[in-house]
Amino acid sequence: MSRITLVRGIGRLFTADGEALDDAALTIDSGTIEDGAPAGGTIAWVGAESGIDNLLTPDDEVDLGGALVTPGLVDAHTHPVYAGNRFAEIALRSAGASYAEIAAAGGGITSTVTATRAAPTDVLAEGLDRRLRAWLAGGTTTVEAKTGYHLNEPGELADVRLLSEWAGPGREGAGVEVTWLAGHDVGPEWEGDADGYSHEVARWCKAAKAAGARHADVFCDEGYFTVAQSRLMLEAAKAAGLIPRIHADELACTGGAELAGEIGCASADHLLRVDEAGIRALAEGGVVATLAPITALAMGHKPPARRMMEAGVTIALGSDHNPGTCGTTSMSFVVALAVAELGLSVAEALRAATAGGARSLRLADRGRIAPGLRADLVAWDADHEGAFAWSYGLSPLALWLAGRRVSLRS
Ligand SMILES: [Zn+2]
């Protein structure tokens, strides 16, 4: 039996699908239970509150008292499977050390790999669980989550299996899109042999797909993987049925964006130093640019967001949550920074954090509020989307994940 919930008293509805509506309402069809598994609730109807009288009698009714409602936010770039911390590096950065200098001194990804390899699976699972609950409590309903801190075959595959446990229904936390990132850095056992390691990663891709990964990513940049090595890993990932994405042109402009266009990546991420040729390649290849304003702030370099939008590139946003440089799970804070730092309007930043993120993850069923789409919905402690840019961390009042009301601790 499917149940219909009427949500009324929506002061402003930011649909990410055309103009925002004032004084709106919508209905949620909770979906049916098939073979014991919930099929997932969808949005059944959206319209003016004055149009409600023509509807069927709902099973439940919620009055939001004039609140702003948006699609559930999508965090399109995160690294949430790790142990340990790298707080000592903050002092090094304050003293002027660069990302590359910290990595050369044994910090960076390498220090997290050591801590993560030493951690039992239940410790990694507990940390992941805590973070995914925090994402959801902050209004993020879908999180792209990468592996990449084991850098050997059994560890990376175990990360995929761990993340896959949160990919389906039934968990208390944001839904996960699993990304295989064995190409995050060269595994310690292959130190000095990035070519050899790239060939290994290419061989592991089929097993990653079988273990539950949907996407594959590589760190194509100066000091990490070259364009040729990245191409090798991403072509193997594609052949294994994984959706390719790429860390591109973050530390230096090495041609990552052009490779993304050539391979047909769903997303190219960071792009702090992308050049005109790279921007053209993204536009022509229909590659989404996933930008991480917190990382841009930490690196002291901004991606040319406006230039990319003018060229017709779709923008998505990510927190880039990772153990080294960013611990936040607040996408509402990321939206505020995209406005303050990258020069996006509030509507552009919110579309990037919803519809743009869904597009970067090739998820056609969410990211906008329209009939037939997944009912991932957030009512915010605000009456207009402008509050995102002002508050630097807006709080949800009510939240639905795939049509199911999630209780928020007050
Ligand atoms: Zn990253």
Image (spheres, helix red, strand yellow):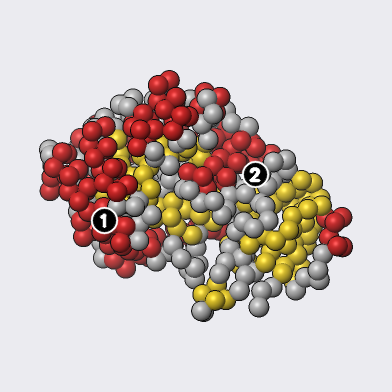
Which residue does the image show at 69% across and 64% down from the upper left? 28
Vertical arrangement, residue 179 with respect to residue 344, above or below = below
Question: Residue 16 — which label?
Answer: 2
Q: Position of residue 373 (x, y in %)?
A: 62, 56
Mark 1 sits on what residue?
Answer: 206
Q: Quadrant of the C terminus?
A: bottom right
Q: Position of residue 399 (x, y in %)?
A: 63, 60
Dot 1: few (<14), some (14–19), or many (≥20) neighbours within 10 Å? some
Which residue does the image show at 30% across and 26% down from the upper left? 254
Q: Nearer the viewer, residue 261 or 331?
A: 261
Q: Is residue 58 left or right of residue 302?
A: right
| Residue sitting at the far top | 276
Q: Nearer the viewer, residue 107 or 167?
A: 167
Q: Position of residue 374 (x, y in %)?
A: 60, 59
Which residue does the image show at 36% across and 44% down from the upper left? 244
Q: Position of residue 316 (x, y in %)?
A: 51, 40
Circle 1 — which element? helix
Vertical arrangement, residue 90 with respect to residue 53, above or below = above
Q: Is residue 148 visible?
A: no
Give how far apart the Cα atoms at labels 1 and 2 are.
Answer: 36 Å
Which residue does the image show at 66% across and 74% down from the upper left? 2
Vertical arrangement, residue 212 with respect to residue 391, above or below = below
Dot 2: few (<14), some (14–19), or many (≥20) neighbours within 10 Å? many
Q: Is residue 220 visible?
A: yes
Q: Nearer the viewer, residue 406 or 298?
A: 406
**Quarter occupied by residue 379:** bottom right
**Quarter occupied by residue 176:** bottom left
Of callouts 1 and 2, which one flags the residue occurring earlier in the amino acid sequence? Answer: 2
How many numbered tags mark residues here? 2
Q: Nearer the viewer, residue 137 or 213?
A: 213
The answer to whether the residue labelled 1 contacts the one labelled 2, judged by CB atoms less than 8 Å apart, is no
Amino acid at pointer 1:
Lys
